[in-house]
Image (cartoon, grey):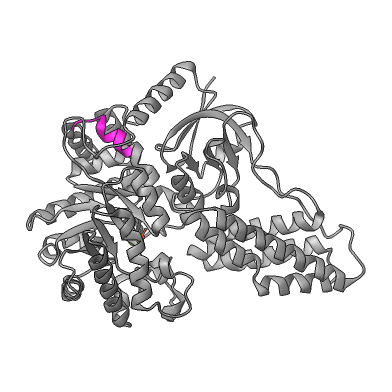
Amino acid sequence: MTTELHGVAAAPGLVVAPVKWLAAAPVTSAGDPRGDDLDAEIARADAALETVSGRYATMAERAEGAAADILTMTAALAADPALREEVHAGIRAGEPTAHAVTGAVAHFAGQLAALGGLMAERVTDLHDVGQRVVAEILGVDPPGIPDGTVPFVLAAADLAPADTATLNPQRVVGLLTVAGGPTSHTAILAKALGIPAVVACPRAVEVAEDTEVLLDGTTGLVEVAPDPARRATVSALRDRRARAATGPGRTADGYSIPLLANVGNATDARLAVEFGAEGVGLLRTEFLFLDRQSAPTIAEQTAHYREILEVLGERPVTVRTLDAGSDKPLPFLHLPAEPNPALGIRGIRLREVDEGTLYEQLAAIASARAATGTPVKVMAPMVATVEEARRFAAAARGAGLSECGIMIEVPAAAARAEYLGAEVDFFSVGTNDLSQYLFGADRMSSALAALHDPWQPALAATIAAVVAGARADAVPVGVCGEAASHPEFACVLAGLGVTTLSMAPRSLPAVRAALAAVTLDACRAAAVAVLTEPTAADAARAARAELGPVQ
Ligand code: PEP
Ligand code: MG
């Protein structure tokens, strides 16, 4: 009999396959045998830390985009002198070498967890470092992806970047985790690889090895031992998606919704072209500067943007100016520590403490546009007031960038869309931060994942208010947050009056197929349904009833 489990939808798509669990990590104890020569033991631990850090660095070289960035950061965690010192202290205190590593990792994991936010997200990465170092010291295989002759759904308590970054999407066709949130690394990497994922599913522990599951990364539903009729539906839907793999975004009755990509570098840009993006709706520029200790020069920035624009050619690109701070700290800016970084100096607010960076960035964007001829728009993140929008527009236009817009990701901006629309040429709704500030729920918190569910009717109501406010000045409203990559919710966004959708390149085919399966009237009916239902679950059910199967 089929059992239904519910988790949080983290990467769209439907798959039917057997489950295989991630191999268990080696366990250490204070009673393990210990070596007598402390210097030799310390050298053994150092060698293991170095080897593991080197392996992450090699994995980073082989990976692309977000995966490469995350692996590079994890390599740095493994090479952290503070971790090494803590391991040495444990060995000198008489602990067995591998157990000293476990202890040091637990010590720093506790500190990271206490810091919360983005730091707490690194706990899984740090545990992965620890398990690999322990395996190296003990001379056993590191925890990892099991072998399988048939494609399988990889299940785990949680997944570290090193588990997912290099996995082969031909072999691992879905991800299922007990922990994690919709914006966790598992979700980001699953989207980048185009694998459906369900996270934060506590009852996943009940699924035995090799049991077949139907995993729906769009709704968060996992059916254990699905019946044959359900399996047939999945293959019909997959065929339809394959047929809609290319072409512009439009509904079944021909209403155009350009489908754009979110990119951070030239590799992403190439993927965007490969997956048929009609342009770039969000070029995140902060990733270019994440590891910098000093400010990049205008010439360096120009070269970065040029490289990306050249890949896009004539496709329009919306460049977002620096969204430093909060979950994207940039060391070279030397921003003071803040008790609540998500509520502090971030995005356009950086201008209050550092005006030069924005002007230099705008100059570099204008030069890259001049050098490539790619149509370029610019937009500012975290705008909350008319004054901020006005000053940004003046700075952008002063730099020769005539088409400028703002992200709508703070409720204050949504409430004043009518007035903001008089200042700029377009809006782009950042649903990740808009949900964070609308619900007062940290976007990194897996415990609060339900508040980041795009079906929360308050999110749709806020977007509807933005669309209504934008009408006064005929300002187009796009969406570039994660919600745009949800195939069914993308149809709802079209129904709300959103004119473009921007998402991770690999999410494009599923959204394209969903739009192609519905009329604009059905999208509008689904939007009304979401706006008039009391809860997220009711809204999802009512919208699905209007849309029919779209995936
Ligand atoms: C958002 O907030 O929805 C968004 C697209 O921006 P970021 O995820 O980079 O904050
Ligand atoms: Mg944002």
- Please state which of residues 123 and 143 is positioned toward the viewer in this rendering: 143
Q: Is residue 266 magenta?
A: no
Quadrant where the C terminus sits is top left
Q: Is residue 498 above or below residue 398?
A: above
Q: Is residue 470 left or right of residue 360?
A: left
Q: Is residue 349 above or below residue 491?
A: below
- Furthest toward the front, the residue is 371
Instruction: Name the quarter showing ligand 1.
Output: bottom left
Q: Is residue 364 left or right of residue 16?
A: left
Quadrant where the N terminus sits is top right
Q: Main secondary structure of the magenta part?
A: helix
Residue displayed at 76% across by 66% down: 47
Q: Is residue 455 above or below residue 478?
A: above
Q: Residue 97, located in which quarter of the rendered image?
A: bottom right
- Furthest toward the top, the residue is 228
Q: Is residue 419 left or right of residue 489?
A: left
> Could you tell me if residue 540 is visible in this image?
yes
Percent position of residue 543, x then y: 27, 34
- Please state which of residues 309 and 243 is positioned toward the viewer in this rendering: 309
Q: Is residue 515 magenta?
A: yes
Residue displayed at 52% across by 22% down: 2
- Please state which of residues 172 and 35 is positioned toward the viewer in this rendering: 172
Percent position of residue 536, x then y: 33, 42
Q: Residue 515, located in which quarter of the rendered image?
A: top left
Residue displayed at 8% across by 54% down: 474
- Please state which of residues 292 and 412 is positioned toward the viewer in this rendering: 292
Percent position of residue 503, x then y: 34, 49
Magenta range: 511-519
> Could you tell me if residue 437 is visible in this image?
no
Percent position of residue 203, x then y: 56, 37
